[in-house]
Image (cartoon, rainbow, N blue to C red):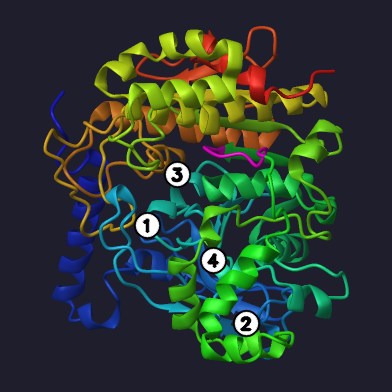
Amino acid sequence: MQAMQPIQQRKIRLMRKNLTLAILLSVGLSGCIDTEFETSANMSKQPTNTVSTEQGVLEGTWSKTDPDIGVFRGVAYAQPPVGELRWREPQDLASWRGVRQAQEFGAACWQSYSEDAFVWSRGEFPRSEDCLHLNVWQAQKTSVAAPVMVWFHGGAHTGGFAHVELFDGTELARQGVVVVTVNYRLGPWGFLAHPALAEESEHNSAGNYGLMDKIAALKWVQKNIQGFGGDPDNVTIFGQSAGSSSVCALMASPLTSGLFHKAIGQSAACLAKEKRDANGQERGVRLTTLALGKLASQESATKVTAKQLRSIDNEALLSAMQTSDWSAGSRIVVDGWVLPEAPLDVFNANRQAKVPLLVGSLANEGHELLPLNNALTEAELDQYLSKTFVDSAPKLKALYAEDLAISPGMALREILTDAFMAMSMRSWAQYNHNADQPTYLYYMDYVPPAYQIYLFNEPDLNLPNGPRSAGAYHSGDLAFVFNNVGKNGDFWLEEDLSMARTMSGYWTNFAKTGNPNGANLPNWASYEPQGHNTQLLSKQVRTIAGAKREKLDLLAQRYQAKKK
């Protein structure tokens, strides 16, 4: 099938826009509007879009592609975490008088720039510690409040932001939900754990500030979303990669009771157990020692204080993060308050949030995401497998014979990928089923185009073997979930549009009812551990009896969730 030149819908919008401009020019009014964002039709239909929140009145705008969808950008949900508020629980906003504008996105939270990072390149962008903002896409108001979907972006908890075209919530809002996307603190700003920070905390905890931000955003939703037409009693949290592991951790936190009612996790769980330094403070000390430099050396005989930590500038923190081993361990830690114990222990004890769950992963998650050790020998692979999987090692190796034929390093990467992604997502589903909650598991092997997903105006990646040579890569589901395919680049196919309608339909149906099924969608059987029912998101969408069944069954012998 040939790649589309602009899809028919965009042609119609362009024709309408050109007609509007012609009319305006004929009467000399073209300078009175911003043609990038508004037309005379929607200006007269909806001249303003204001909502009263607990703190004051916000004035938003309208979606660039649908004048019936309201958009509020850069809405602060907590005080800026700067100065004395750095490395503290987010604080409530003060009220304001008058109308505060919410028409421009806020800055990204502090992080590294990413110039050459496969599909995840983000280029350069404004960044600030004053970054606790969210964005709202407002469905058409009806007499019945709309379900709410709150999005947590990925990026290894060290990068990313919510205000990119990829996460534009217009198309989801058109399906009858209110969409909220959230920026949260990242890297050491969001997840540094250090004894000095624990000592000053009334909870004797340190770290997980990025999780606290998400909790603060969910509290903001509870207090304010009705004004945007949303239902605070029907909130679904969803996220991908680091955002998905955050969803998992929020299910394990005692601080989230009543803040959400359904959960969707895409391509990462939180069910690994840290072998050491579970509270992250050892790594935190090493990072801050590097960042403080001479000061830390001079004061080695005394304790570094929280005040001294807050004196570290952003570039020094960023450099220390990059040169230390801080990122080698989990950014989410067992801090004793947000997470009093490891999420795995909470799920094993069946004490996680009891909510409907939809989770899954893609077929080629490890491609460009996990390291490929081309120097690994087959003997070294055998040694690793024997130590890790004992008697199951020979059979497991045989199951990955196709990858081994490429290289031992490829076989190891695929084993680690399946354990990290497909097996852990299946385990997460099994835990939720064990808690007698509706559960739906998916596996996506549909191959999307690989492009720079965050650089809307520079999407081309120019892979040697074409845009579909990267398989079903990590993050390849995002444009489909948000139904934002076909909006940039010339590599989209008609079948991509169909898959996007299917996936966004499943996701919004689940947010509405806790069940992804609906009219005009292939039936999705709920998960049960005997058959491992899995919805295969492929060219032919259907339920299968488990993806990679033999491989995951062997991997689960080591990492198996406890059964009832």
Please identify the dominant SS of the magenta region: loop
Q: Which residue is mark 4?
A: 187
Q: Is residue 267 magenta?
A: yes
Q: What amino acid type should be assigned to the residue bearing mark 4? A: Gly
Looking at the image, residue 478 sits to the left or right of residue 205; the answer is: left
| Range of residues picked out in magenta | 266-272
Q: Which residue is mark 1?
A: 165
What is the C-alpha distance between the residues marked 4 and 1? 23 Å
Could you say which is closer to the camera, residue 444 or residue 158?
158
Are discs 4 and 2 less than 8 Å apart at CB?
Answer: no
Residue at 75%, 79% in the rendered image: 196
Looking at the image, residue 443 sits to the left or right of residue 224; the answer is: left
Are discs 2 and 3 less than 8 Å apart at CB?
Answer: no
| Among numbered discs 2 and 3, the one appearing first in the sequence | 2
Q: Which quadrant would the C terminus be assigned to in this image?
A: top right
Counting from the top left corner in percent of width and height, residue 230 is at 68, 54
Counting from the top left corner in percent of width and height, residue 243 is at 57, 50
